Image (tube, rainbow, N blue to C red):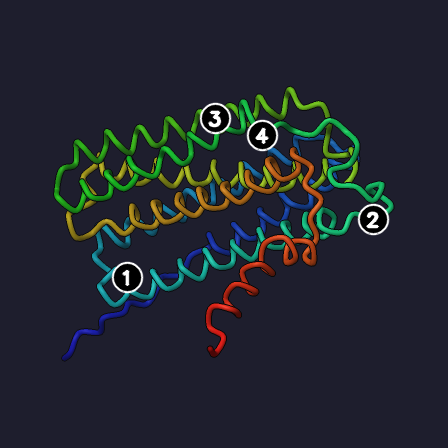
Amino acid sequence: MKRCPFHRVDHSPWPLMTAWFLGLSAISFVQFLHGEPLYWVLLAVMDSILCICWWLVDIVTEATFMGKHTIRVQRGIRIGFCFFLLSESMFFISFFWAFFHSALAPGMVCGFYWPPEMETMKCTGIPLINTGLLLGTIFPCNIAQSAVKAGHFYTFLLWLGIVMIMGAFFVGLQAWEYYTAKFTMADGIYGSCFFALTGLHGLHVIGGLVFLFVAWNRGRLGHFSSYRHLNLTFAVWYWHFVDGIWVVVYSFVYVWSNWGWQWSFSELFDKFLAPVVYWLDHLYAPQ
């Protein structure tokens, strides 16, 4: 009988329970913003983390010790993870949409001026250091992945550990930036957009660090080989995704807002694109 390249997933309570507790986390967080105690948020988040951990244990057991993740299964998982990154991109685009809606056409609420007349977050100092930290992880992250493919696992552990340390410094500096900020999330549209975008990205950085730590620990336990390291591949993809989102966040939320550029789409076209169109029109005009 021909062996099927797929496998039937065993019944598991973790997807339903994870979705349930994540929903409770969101609801309890909204209630916390309206004055409810914080411990409900912490309890729901801890339950969510426990469910995710046990779900990951089942996946690792299924892939590493039971051999159920065949080449065909891995291909499907890769496609699914790409769609996951696409959905995450759409999630960030919705927040950027809110930011640009107010930044490109500031209304009466903003005083017809962007950024509003308040002390905004500087684009130098901690934000610039954080940008250097995240962009600096690209090189060691790729070295770690290449080391696994070459079978050099000590090099892999070393460089991936450096990536996690740099990411932890990023989170710490981000928390200090929040602590020393001169405005809060309640200070108008700018404060809401700033803390929503940077806070959402910070949560993704923490998730990426957890993802990298799981890959690092599995590499330490000998779960990877030079041709089977899908966990590490996904962790590297996700970390590069976080890097790319931060570049956009820093460029617009920090630099653009801090320098107070008053651009609209028509002004952008008149200043930059119209001369290019005029030059191309005359370059390719019939003689």
The crowding category of the residue bearing disc 4, from other C-alpha atoms within 10 Å (few below 14, some 14 to 19, many at least 20), is some
* SS for callout 2: loop
Q: The disc labelled 3 sits on which kind of residue?
A: Ile
Front tag of 1 and 3 = 3
Point out which mark residue 171 bears: none
Mark earlier in primary sequence (2, 3): 2
Question: Dots 2 and 3: beta carbons under 8 Å?
Answer: no
The crowding category of the residue bearing disc 3, from other C-alpha atoms within 10 Å (few below 14, some 14 to 19, many at least 20), is some
Residue that carries the numbered disc 1 in the rendered image: 74
Q: The disc labelled 4 sits on which kind of residue?
A: Cys
User: Alpha carbon of mark 1 to alpha carbon of mark 3: how far?
Assistant: 37 Å
**With respect to residue 267, does 40 lie above or below?**
above
Mark earlier in primary sequence (1, 2): 1
Q: The disc labelled 2 sits on which kind of residue?
A: Gly
Question: Dots 4 and 2: beta carbons under 8 Å?
Answer: no
Q: The disc labelled 1 sits on which kind of residue?
A: Gln
User: Alpha carbon of mark 2 to alpha carbon of mark 3: how far?
Assistant: 33 Å
Front tag of 1 and 2 = 2
**With respect to residue 244, does 42 lie above or below?**
above
Residue that carries the numbered disc 4 in the rendered image: 123
Mark earlier in primary sequence (3, 4): 4
User: Which sits in the foreground, 101 or 280?
Assistant: 280
Front tag of 1 and 4 = 4
Residue 142 in the image: x percent, y percent?
A: 27, 42
Mark earlier in primary sequence (1, 4): 1
Residue that carries the numbered disc 3 in the rendered image: 129
User: Residue drawn at (33%, 52%), measured in percent from left and top?
Assistant: 59
User: Which sits in the foreground, 235 or 263?
Assistant: 263
Residue that carries the numbered disc 2 in the rendered image: 107
User: Residue drawn at (62%, 40%), measured in percent from left and top?
Assistant: 256
